[in-house]
Image (cartoon, helix red, strand yellow):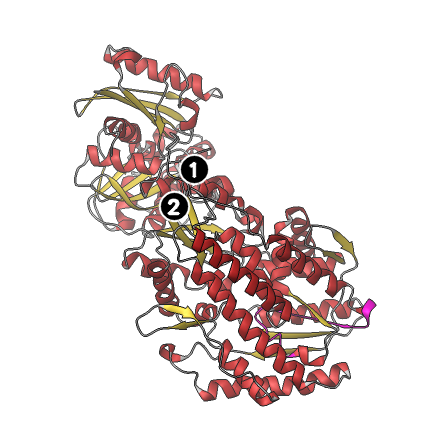
Amino acid sequence: MTTSVEVKEYPSEPLRCWEQAKNLRKNYYEDYLRAHEKGGLRWAGGAWSFSGIPAGLGEDVYCITGEPYGATVAFYKDFASKCHDATEAAGFPRTLCAYMRNYWGSILLDKYILTDGTVVDGYPAPDFIWQDHICCSHGKWYQLVKWLEKKRGKEVPMYSVDVSVGYPSDFGPEEDYKVDYIVGQLSDGIDWLEKVTGRNYNDALLCEAVWNEMKATSLWAEVCALNQAVPAPLDEKTMYSLYVMGTLMKHRPECVAFYETLRNETQDRVKRGIAAVPNERFRVITDTQPPWGFLKIFREMEKYGAVSVGSLYTFGLIGMWQYQPDGTWIPRPVPPQRPRTREEALQAIVRWTMHKPEWAHFYEPELKTKMMQSIVKQWKVDAVLLHYNRGCEGLSVHIAENRFGLLQAGVPVFPFEGNMGDERDFDFAGTLARLTAFFESMGLRKLKE
Amino acid sequence: MITAGVDVGAKFAKVVIFKDGQVVARAKALVGFDVLKSAIEVFEAALKDAGLSRSDIGRVVATGMGRNAVVQKPPINAEEAVSEVVADAAGAFQAVPTVKTVIDVGAEEGRGVKVEGGKVRDFVINERCAAGAGTFVEAMARALEVNVEEMGPLSLKSANVIPMNAQCCVFAESEVVSLIHSKISKEDIAKAIHDAIAGRISSMILRVGVEKDVVLIGGCALNPGFKPPLEKELHTNIIVPEFPEYVSALGAAVIAANPAR
């Protein structure tokens, strides 16, 4: 509705640690680019991979995680368009994972994009690939990277860990046979890393990286849990720029330090009643990656006083949680003792990672629906916006089932079609028109232009 | 209070004047390039028909894709704009109080709305292509070289099933041309076109679920060839109210009469 309505406004202020977040991300991409200048190693793999394992090769080992890189490309629509053109010209269909196509396109164009949109000539090839096979695209993604690099004259060795063990049954303890299956692969992977890099593996660095990862991912869950407050101290559009640190460097001490700073600042915002969105009066969550080129949709929502307080994706891709018997979630407590040996470290990180809520997408729709229902209740959510993300089969699988599950539980749902990484699949004006209708059907009126 | 609902659609602007729970006048005309001018002409025609002037109208609410063009713009001066979905629910409930599911097929868009007491419970809108809207029938009529008004009656003369698979309005036209070259009769092609649009709409409606009573509104509801295949696809009877193309405008007028809703 176009008539304006006056509502109470909460106090709001920018995040003090925002610049720190920007710099961390900027340095990450530049460190990977310049790793060889410093005598270091470069590796490539997914944000889901066990990134703490290659850390045992030394402190001068830098990675580029594929999905965040694909998202960065997507944000810069002109460059993304060139990547799509290059990928399609090379014979790949546009129905494949959009992150993967953005990444391949970057290699095909032989150009690398930095976080400020600067496009650098020469895509920096990795020295090795360390990946996990979380969905149908992840393993294949890097097989193609290996192939593309070979065509450019570089042989890139690749190791992929199969993680098809599922979430622990009934939110219970991790089953040993599942743990052993992954630990065995990681253990073999360490031998492989030594062989392909010619370096000796340092177990103390591994233990440190695993400990960092557990702390960082628990801290991010703490930050997300603080968003249960009304008004929400953070909005999801902002959280995208914060959770990303965990997708880039969850095993690094800088990540732990940043999330401690962020947790403390968020606690302070809650204490002082600082809102991310001053006119908050309707709380939503989303699902899966957003259409990165159209994050302005969140600003449009704010005109109705609607704030997205997060999602299973934002909370659970990096955050590690403990599901309580009463159906509530708490940030997963870090184990009382840090690992001291290689075996302890591998056991610890596998048991820890098996509780990653985002794994739920790949196994049971009911499990994911249950998790979403818990978030709705605990985070005081009024409605769910479901992104039928045509760019990610993995995270979109079962999404229509989730819609039914939420509707049956009495939760209003707004589904919209789009693509996280390919703007051609997202109709901004059409989506906005439908979102307007949805908000109106929820009794909301536009508060401001 | 006398109120008015103005529905500025993709092709037609429609106005309903509403007084004491009854429609006292309605008017419609094609929307030209100047949307506001078209809406004003229709609005003034409706006022003239009712023997009223703008000052007699207590509140005006606008809807339709061009709704924002008439908000706070004289002489219409609509106080508020509401989405088509909200207007559909209110209008269909006014026209058929037992309604639970509204199917609105206009020129450019198809919608399904689950309704409870005139309020929206859930809704779905077609995405991307006009293959599930009235424009599709118009484009196919051009390909068949018949008037659009003839398409429905023509389709009812056929009992044959000819699949039309194209999900795109433009590609469907190529498919129709292929059928013409294959010497398929106009009646059979017209039926295939209506079956296709009914298929698109029904698959969309099934996403929100079908609950009786089902009410079909919008310009396509005037097409007699559309309702039978839609009923067949959805396995239910469908009610077409009188003046189905005015139901959104009626909804806007009803909303105008209940500002504190």
Q: Position of residue B185 (x, y in %)?
A: 39, 40
Q: Is residue A301 above or below residue A3?
A: below
Contact flag, marks 1 and 2 (Cβ < 8 Å): yes
Indicate the position of residue A208 as horizontal and vertical percent values: 62, 79
What segment is highlighted magenta in the picture? A37-53
Distance, label 1 to label 2, CA atoms, is 10 Å
| Residues at discs 1 and 2 both on one chain | yes
x 61%, y 61%: residue: A68
Q: Dot 2, crowdedness within 10 Å: few (<14), some or many (≥20)?
A: many
Task: Tell me the quadrant of the picture where the N terminus of chain A can be found.
Answer: top left
Q: Earlier in the sequence, mark 1 or mark 2?
A: 1
Q: Residues within 10 Å of mark 1 (few under 14, many from 20)?
A: many
- What label sits on residue B152 in the rendered view? none
Is A63 within the magenta? no
Residue A396 visible from this viewpoint:
no
Relative depth, front residue between A3 and B193 = A3
Q: Is residue A118 left or right of residue B74?
A: right
At 61% from the left and 82% from the top, the residue drawn is A207
Chain under disc 1? B
- Tell which of B169 and A428 is nearer to you: A428
Residue A41 located within the stretch drawn in magenta: yes
Q: Quadrant of residue A243?
A: bottom right
Quadrant in the rendering for residue B123: top left
Q: Which mark is residue B196?
A: 2
Residue B136 numbered tag: 1
A81 with respect to A269 (left or right): right
